[in-house]
Amino acid sequence: MGGHSCLDAEKMNIEAYDDLGARCRMLGHAVPFSYCRQVADGLPCRLVLDCWHEKFAVAQFIQEHYTAEQIEVFMSPGKAKVASLVDLIEQAKRRAGQGSP
Ligand code: SF4
């Protein structure tokens, strides 16, 4: 007991959540995450945080698999969203990194 719990979330496979589903507000029916993460010319949907943050650590996922430039591209219709992403990432980091000195 004590010790570190295994943080395999730190190395998430990009396909790890592909089979999860959410109801898409744009299409009006359920879609798998594999769709959402590639829908914008191979980049995620700009609503990916809104739709998925309750289902898994999507902000952390985005941070690990995409560069800041890519994030800005797919979030660009609403630049303010980048700030909320950074916020979510910070929260996720704090939660994930509680054990680190
Ligand atoms: S992230 Fe985009 S494509 Fe995926 S469910 Fe939400 S609105 Fe639809």
Image (cartoon, rainbow, N blue to C red):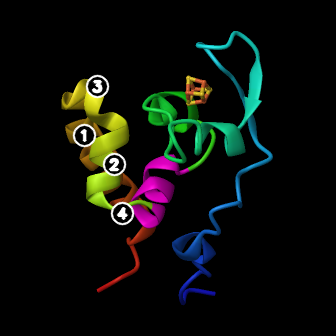
**Depicted 40 relative to depicted 18: above or below:** above
Circles 3 and 4, Cβ within 8 Å, touching? The answer is: no
Tell me the distance, in whole angstroms, between the alpha carbons under discs 4 and 2.
17 Å
Closer to the observer: label 3 or label 4? 3
On the image, numbered disc 1 is attached to which residue? 82
* Residue interval drawn in magenta: 57-65
The answer to which quarter of the image holds residue 69 is: bottom left
* Mark 1 or mark 4, earlier in chain: 1
N-term-proximal mark, 3 vs 2: 2
At x 70%, y 45%, the residue is 34
Pointer 2 residue: 71
Q: The residue under label 2 is which amino acid type?
A: Ile
Q: Circle 2 sits in a helix, a strand or a loop, which is it?
A: helix
**Do residues under tags 1 and 4 come within 8 Å of each other at their CB atoms?**
no
Residue ID for mark 3: 77
Q: Which residue is mark 4?
A: 93
Q: Nearer the viewer, mark 1 or mark 4?
A: 1
